[in-house]
Amino acid sequence: MRPAILTEIKYLLPWGVLTVVVAGLVAAATPANGISDYSLMCLGLGCAILAARAFGKERLRVETATESPENVRTIRMSAVSITTLAAAAAFSLMSAKARVPHGLSVPLLAVLSSTPALGIVPYLTVRTRKPFAAVVFSAFIVGAIKIASCVVVRIVYGPEALADGYMAGDWQTAKLMISLFWSGTVFVSFVLAFACARQFVPTPVPTET
């Protein structure tokens, strides 16, 4: 199984490198050498597309004729996990000296931004068999979690929650909203990763005639 995982990683690695480069360039372009939400969004989106490529119906790198569905799923998930976490680590190293206005560390934000690629995207890709649609739907789910977090904050802090900074991206003033958003994203990713494991059926590799 290890050679198959390495083969998958080699297939995904160019996209992982591109993701890190784009996210790093966006971070470098941020005023005052800071980490903006845009660079983290680029990192998360790149990892999501990477996961969709791995689990898409056009993926033919793994010989499904000789591997059980469980092994194929393990191979692909292992490759996605290693590649996305490596991308998060590389982005963190590139941004090590950057200012973090969120109040949270760059490595933590990088890992959290990549979590949808480890659960939400694989599940939706397997369910829809449409990688692009899976990435779009995943973005909607993450957005819905963000909206739900803001609704809770609005209920807790009242009508002036937005004006008082309780829905901002600053950890010092928006601890509740940020905690709800990231914990909700991680929880949904964790649940859908298990759901993906139960429903995963790889697309057979067509045989040559």
Image: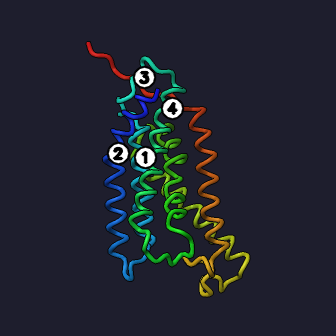
Q: Which residue is mark 1?
A: 83
Q: Check residue 129 in the rendering and tell me which mark sits there, or answer none.
A: none
| Residue under label 3 | 64
Q: Secondary structure at mark 1?
A: helix
Question: Disc 1, disc 4: CB below 8 Å?
Answer: no
Pointer 2 with pointer 3, Cβ within 8 A: no
Amino acid under disc 4 = Arg
Disc 2 and disc 4: Cα gap in Å?
A: 18 Å
Labels 4 and 3 touching (C-beta < 8 A): no
Say which of 106 and 19 sits in front. Answer: 106
Select label 1 or label 4 by which is in front.
1
Residue that label 2 marks: 13
> Callout 1, which amino acid?
Thr
Crowd band around label 2 with a 10 angstrom C-alpha radius: few (<14), some (14–19), many (20+):
many
Looking at the picture, which amino acid does disc 3 mark? Thr
For the residues labelled 2 and 4, say whether their Cβ atoms are less than 8 Å apart. no
Residue 60: x and y in percent read: 35, 29
Which amino acid is tagged 2?
Leu
Residue 77, position in %: x, y? 50, 38
Marks 1 and 2 close (CB-CB < 8 Å): yes
- Residue visible at 62% across and 39% down in the picture: 194
Q: Say if 74 sits above or below 48 in the image.
A: above
Q: Which mark is residue 73?
A: 4
